[in-house]
Amino acid sequence: MKWTTANIKHANYTEKHELYVGTHTGSFKYLVPASEKSPHGQSNLSDLGALGKDSRVTSLAFGNEAQTDILLGRAKTEVELHSFSDGRRSKKTVFFNAAPIVGLARYDDKLIAGIGNGQIQSLELQAENKSEPVVIATGNQMDHLRQCAQVRSIVATGGKERQNNLKVYDMSSDGKQIFSSKNLPNDYLQLEVPVWDCDIGFVDGPSVLATCSRTGYVRLYDTRKQRRPIASFASDEHGMSFTALVAQGNFIYTGTSMGALKAFDTRRMKTHVHTYKGFTGGISDLHLDTTGRYLSSASLDRYVRIHDAESTVLLYQCYVKSKATKIIIRQLESERKIIEQPESDAELEVVSNVRQMKSVSATPVDNEYEDMFDQMPTINDSDDDSEGTEVTATKQSKDKLKRKSAITSLKSKKRKGVQN
């Protein structure tokens, strides 16, 4: 699709999605691309009158596996917990000791925040008395904190300079550090390779991670093998400055400050395999839906977009009036209930809808028995009819011969009597 600034929705985009977007001005927007009447309509979930210069949304993440809780962090010390369940919304505010909040996670009724000064702070949500958060020092600067979706006790951090490189912590063991990456060897001038892990992504588990950098590299780590990256891509020639990353399966999706969205295959990191078009500003955040097929993006050109991750087609684009900094995508609540329906209930519903086929569906099928009948030759009715017609034709011809022979014999007798 050609570049356009209009609000668009592809005719083939029929998925029931909803978007939550955080902006540079601090507004928290809600969009429903699945709506038939107003797919580009927006509603603000935050009080616009209370927003200030330090209200910029710097972190946005789901707080549980069911994706009913949303954690929102700003460039100040407060964190908002939004709960969406049964069509109702509730909000709770929690305060930390430092700012800005660059990453949020929730584990075992604890709220975990990554702070820009290099600290990980953990705070009890259900504490009766106001308590001080537990602080874990990771370095002197942090760009992002990411929680593993498969093992929610694992979090990873990354930042600028070698002392703030990729680190992995286990929050179930009081924040024990279980992995620390190691930089590449020095270059041919024996100079240290610059390190700046500005975004992190877990690749379908706690052991494999991917990082991207504003200095122009994408690296893949396996904590079970070695501290140095097992695969990497460097864009010295193109000068790419990667700002956002999300990973799932064999693919890593990265966005740059120049508005380029690339996809890399973890099995071959020498070059990108897909390019997604339609951007006119730097990409600030990326997020995949649960299926991994739909890739949502937030851009500084004030647009949010949804691409098909496989075909790279632009499916949805909406102008949100402010610079979008964070975005998350999820299924509509009604659709999630249908997907989470137990298999037993689904089977009962199918059986009740087709009661007349109960006996047929309940009968076991013997494949060998069916194959034997399939291999047997078939007898057509047309052959039987042709054989029957042939038999009747032969009978009629025999009768005619008998009549002719009887007539000839009578004529011969009459001739003999006249002669005598």
Image (cartoon, rainbow, N blue to C red):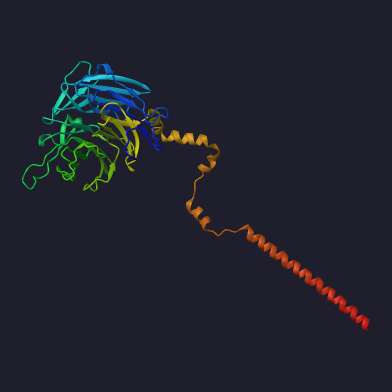
Q: Is 388 placed above or below 13 here?
A: below
Q: Considering depth in this image, is 380 or 42 the residue closer to the camera?
A: 42
Report which quarter residue 397 is drawn in.
bottom right
- Which quarter of the rendering shows the C terminus? bottom right
Report which quarter residue 55 is drawn in.
top left
Report which quarter residue 309 is drawn in.
top left
Instruction: Give percent across and percent down for residue 198.
Output: 18, 35
What residue do we see at 42% from left, 27% from top?
37
Give the left or right position of residue 342, taking residue 112 as reference.
right
- Which quarter of the rendering shows the N terminus? top left
Furthest residue to the bottom? 420
What residue do we see at 27% from left, 16% from top?
49
Instruction: Give percent across and percent down for residue 323.
Output: 25, 28
Confirm whether residue 43 shows in the render: yes
Give the left or right position of residue 350, taking residue 253 as reference.
right
Instruction: Give percent across and percent down for residue 115.
Output: 16, 27
Q: Considering depth in this image, is 14 or 157 the residue closer to the camera?
A: 14
Instruction: Give percent across and percent down for residue 334.
Output: 40, 28
Give the left or right position of residue 331, taking residue 271 as reference.
right
Confirm whether residue 106 shows in the render: no
What residue do we see at 45% from left, 35% from top?
346
Q: Considering depth in this image, is 122 or 15 the residue closer to the camera?
A: 15
